[in-house]
Amino acid sequence: MMHKCKMTFLISEALNYFFLRQNLFKKSVEIQELQNKKFRALIKHAYETVPYFKQKFSSLGLTPANIKTVDDIVKIPPITKSEIQEGSLDNHLSRSYTINQCSARKTSGSTGHPFNLFIDQRGVSISEVLWLRAFLKNGLKIRDKMIFIKNPRSLTRSMSFLQRLGIFPRDEISIFEDPEKQLLKLSAYKPDVIRTWTSCLSVLARRYDRSLNINPRMIFTSAEFLDNYTRKYIEDIFDSKVFDYYSCEEFGLMGWECSKHDGYHINSDSLIIEFLKDDAPAEVGERGEIVVTHLDNFAMPFIRYKLGDIGVLSDDVCTCGLTLPKIKFVEGRNDDFLVALNGDWMSARTVSDVLEYSTDDYKGLIQYRIEQIEKDKIKIMLKVNNLFNSEESFHKVEVEMKKYLGEDMDIDIRLVDDIPADKSGKIRKVISTIKTSL
């Protein structure tokens, strides 16, 4: 019986992959038709089986009959993380499912407020296939040994049926293990592919000894902002190409780089991603708050969910041949922006460019963290080596930062022995306690 269930699951996965791979090359109008069909089904399901959405739609005088295409999505107000956290879990779960039928996830809590969410098995299957689709398109082979460095709460306790057959073999390492131990495990496993968070790999690159012979063919990074300097540094240290992925617990893989490394292809066949400015659609090329609707999770529907990230939509046609739309870049979370004295925003991307320019291509700079603790006060922590000219570089950093933030900004620059990681294991480069709004 167990063998039959596994075969059924594998056949389902194979069919999902077959259809999802075809979507990579469909015309935009075909993807829109697919979105409309899925969106109508999601709205009907949420209205009929999810108390929160039944109440929300009724209070707005809406029924599924009022939602015919994705264009009608603006009739539904966005939902925030705090609304889910403050409400009852039962209010957000579909009555068509029990928790035992779902996969439980927990958001990373990078904002300090994690919460539990649930995904139905079909949604889990599609999510896994979307990751596989991107990996295979970027050159993953079925016999490639992949190693995941991740939060221990999501470590896999046993091998899958395919892995026992030697297909997509993989191993896992806790992100909280000592970096030297992580490097030794990587050296022993000899992975073809490494998949982990950007800041984790950056830490390992700083401590890498070439005698360990860790030479993956590819590196997949995700979950954090990847600046150009860090990308180049990691690629040079491990002599490997880095592919960055835009993902989160709520929606899985949302966007991914192709071989052109020119933005992130959006998984529009599974998600609706909007870019809003003042709750209205942002223009192409304009910075906007990212709002996401999951078309394949019916257990706990996320409809117009404010993710807390800021990004820019692109209208460029990718030369790789894929027709999926692209995010030009993701600049980070709302609290990954510094606010200038005149109210302008300075993203983690801009900060990295300023530091790179100000310190002569990061000469001697190992890591940094910038914290805006008050509207007119910035604290900068720098971890450096003996190549760093403290007095001269401090002055350059201060001058350049004040160009963006204002001449009267109080900037406190300190050398530190180490940059602490968050509870999640991530090392954020920019943190602000100043509330921002597009």
Image (cartoon, rainbow, N blue to C red):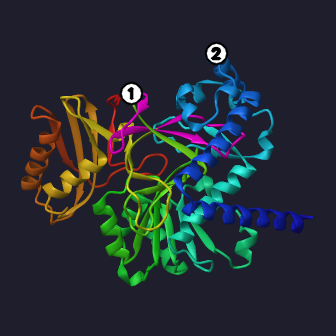
Q: Is residue 348 visible?
A: yes
Identify which amino acid the numbered label 2 is placed on. Ser
The reply to whether discs 2 and 1 touch (Cβ–Cβ < 8 Å) is no
Secondary structure found at label 2: helix
Figure check: 186 above or below 398: below
Image-quadrant location for residue 146? bottom right
- Check disc 1 and report the residue beneath it: 278
In the rendered structure, which disc, 2 or 1, sits on the residue that comes first in sequence? 2
- Residue 300 makes an appearance in the image: no
Q: Count numbered badges in the picture.
A: 2
The label number, if any, that marks residue 293 in the structure image:
none
Q: Residue at x 20, y 61 (%)?
A: 362
Residue 223 location in percent, x, y? 47, 53
Residue of label 2: 59
Q: Position of residue 109 (x, y in %)?
A: 51, 41
Residue 49 location, quadrant: top right
* Residue 125 shown left or right of residue 137 in the figure: right
CA distance separating discs 2 and 1: 22 Å
Q: Is residue 281 magenta?
A: yes
For label 2, count other residues whose C-alpha is less than 10 Å away and answer few (under 14), some (14-19) or many (20+). Answer: few
State which quarter of the image contains the C terminus: top left
Classify 10 Å Cα crowding around label 1: few (below 14), some (14-19), many (20 and above): few
Residue shown at 67% from the left, 43% from the top: 37
Between residues 114 and 101, which one lies in front from this camera angle? Answer: 101
Measuring from the top left, give residue 159's x and y in whole percent: 71, 68
Dot 1 amino acid type: Asp
Q: Is residue 226 left or right of residue 96?
A: left
**Residue stretch rendered in magenta on the structure:** 278-307
Residue 73 x %, y %: 56, 32
Residue shown at 57% from the left, 37% from the top = 70
